[in-house]
Amino acid sequence: MNELEIDPKVVAEQLGHTLDVNLNTYTKVAQKRRKQAVDLLENSVLVN
């Protein structure tokens, strides 16, 4: 559901958990999104 960009609060409520449990226990970031974040960071550092 994270990959579909569904509001984390909605997901937590559907699963019967708090937002904290949903985000810190169940939500895993896909490799593709991790790479995008690293690329953005790298570009910002190299540009400055």
Image (cartoon, rainbow, N blue to C red):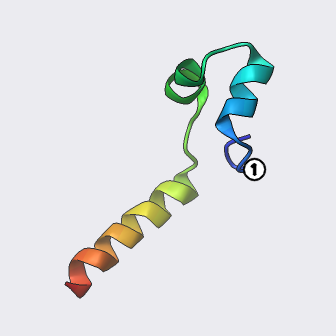
SS category of the residue bearing label 1: loop
Residue 10 sits above or below residue 3 on the image:
above
Residue 10 sits above or below residue 2 on the image:
above
**Amino acid residing under circle 1:** Leu
Direction top: furthest residue = 16
**Residue at the spot x=40%, y=70% of the render?**
39
Residue 45: give x, y in percent of width and height: 23, 75
How many discs appear? 1
Residue 31: give x, y in percent of width and height: 53, 52
Image quadrant occupied by the N terminus: top right
* Quadrant of the rendered image containing residue 32: bottom right
> Pointer 1: what residue?
4
| Horizontal relation, residue 2 to residue 23: left or right | right
| Horizontal relation, residue 17 to residue 41: left or right | right
* Quadrant of the rendered image containing residue 12: top right
Residue 23 sits above or below residue 39 on the image:
above
| Horizontal relation, residue 5 to residue 21: left or right | right
Direction bottom: furthest residue = 47
| Horizontal relation, residue 10 to residue 42: left or right | right
**Residue at the spot x=59%, y=33% of the render?**
27
Q: Residues within 10 Å of mark 1 (few under 14, many from 20)?
A: few
**Closer to the camera in the image, 6 or 26:** 6
**Residue at the spot x=70%, y=41% of the render?**
7
Residue 8 sits above or below residue 29 on the image:
above
Image quadrant occupied by the C terminus: bottom left
Direction left: furthest residue = 48
**Residue at the spot x=39%, y=71% of the render?**
40
* Quadrant of the rendered image containing residue 42: bottom left
Residue 21: give x, y in percent of width and height: 55, 18
